[in-house]
Image (cartoon, grey):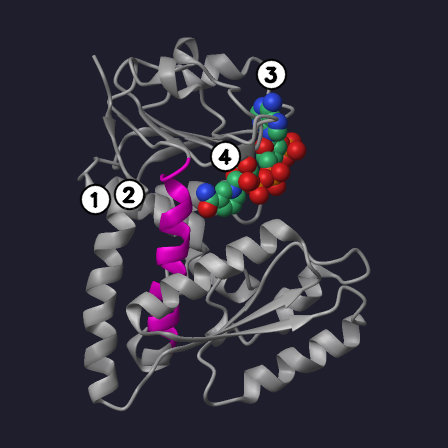
Amino acid sequence: MSAEIISGKDLAQELRLNMKQEVEELRKEGITPQLTVVLVGDNPASKSYVKGKEKAAKEVGISSSVIELPATIPEEELLQLIHKLNQDKEVNGILVQLPLPDHISEQKVIETINPDKDVDGFHPVNIGRMMIGEDTFLPCTPYGILTMLKSRNIQLEGKHAVVIGRSNIVGKPVGQLLLNENATVTYCHSRTKDLRNFTTKADILIVAIGKPNVLTAEDIKDGAVVIDVGINRLESGKLTGDVDFESAVSRASYITPVPKGVGPMTIAMLLKNTIKAAKGLENR
Ligand code: NDP
């Protein structure tokens, strides 16, 4: 058996085409969605992520601007800027690219963003809304994963989903979204004893660890759906996921590749959230 590969690249492209039309319609009503990205310091990975977001926004007709700040900026100054953006009627979505320098509290920054402009879906208000199943801005990576599963009509109800990783931006929220879809969810993490005992029982396996090739075919149940969130750069410069793709592909029914898997979906969902923000609260 060889798994069907779910291409996040292709699906994201399809979504961008649909969003482009949606943005054109909004323009006719005098609304142009606006995304403001704040980039602190000159971390090369962050810079490249921001570039990708700008490019994708442009492609669908979302107006975007990037505010670049030095790594030495005092926390208070950054918070003041966010307050200003919160009040700016032209700005629909605010994204502060993480990670931030050590002297700035990421949590403080996230909590300063107006929840109605929080297109990353990280604000505790939006996380709370997601927990209770209210319509809200969903965190982009988990939202992208759910969209990938739904694109193939993969049944979630009653299925056993195992999530490896419990970060606030990927593991925890993706498990919650699967629970909202009536899956039975198990979380695993670095202290989990006998990881294989859990992974081999998963109908749907979400892997968000951040270490290359932690899982191989032996860790996967026959016919499982495998979503590999990890992005790891090997010494050779090659990008790879957390799952050994070559072996897993023969065991799974569906699998996502790295690169061109979950990554492009994350950006597509950011654009979706920005459009949602532009449409305003009454359409939430
Ligand atoms: P974190 O480092 O915040 O979390 C990693 C999680 O993996 C932790 O919960 C940790 O457990 C767990 N873990 C670590 N080692 C093991 C192990 N050997 N066995 C089981 N669990 C383990 O990472 P993120 O959630 O932010 O990201 C995870 C990966 O996803 C990274 O590679 C990141 O680059 C990628 N990513 C990809 C995105 C995309 O768009 N495709 C977006 C965001 C992230 P513990 O809590 O006990 O420490």
Q: Which span of residues is magenta-colored?
A: 259-277
Quarter of the figure with residue 252:
top left
Q: Mark 1 belongs to which amino acid?
A: Ser
Question: Mark 1, mark 3: which one is toward the viewer?
Answer: 1
Q: Rounded to the nearest whole Å, what is the CA distance between mark 2 and mark 4?
A: 16 Å
Residue to which mark 3 is pinned: 193
Mark toward the start of the polypeptide (1 vs 3): 1
The quarter of the rendered structure image containing the C terminus is bottom left
Q: Picture coordinates of residue 21 (x, y %)? A: 19, 71
Question: Mark 2, mark 4: which one is toward the viewer?
Answer: 4
Q: Are marks 1 and 2 in contact (CB under 8 Å)?
A: yes
Residue name at image x 45 percent, y 54 percent: 131
Residue name at image x 56 percent, y 88 percent: 87
Mark toward the start of the polypeptide (3 vs 2): 2
Q: Which mark is residue 151?
A: 1
Viewer-side residue, 280 vs 28: 28
Q: Mark 4 belongs to which amino acid?
A: Gly
The residue most toward the front is: 236
Q: Picture coordinates of residue 43 (x, y %)? A: 67, 54
Residue to which mark 4 is pinned: 230
Question: Mark 3, mark 2: which one is toward the viewer?
Answer: 2
Q: Tell me which image quadrant ligand 1 sits in.
A: top right
Left or right: residue 256 versus residue 231 is left
Is label 3 in a helix, a strand or a loop? loop
Is label 4 in a helix, a strand or a loop? loop
Q: Rounded to the nearest whole Å, what is the CA distance between mark 1 and mark 2?
A: 5 Å
Q: Mark 2 belongs to which amino acid?
A: Met
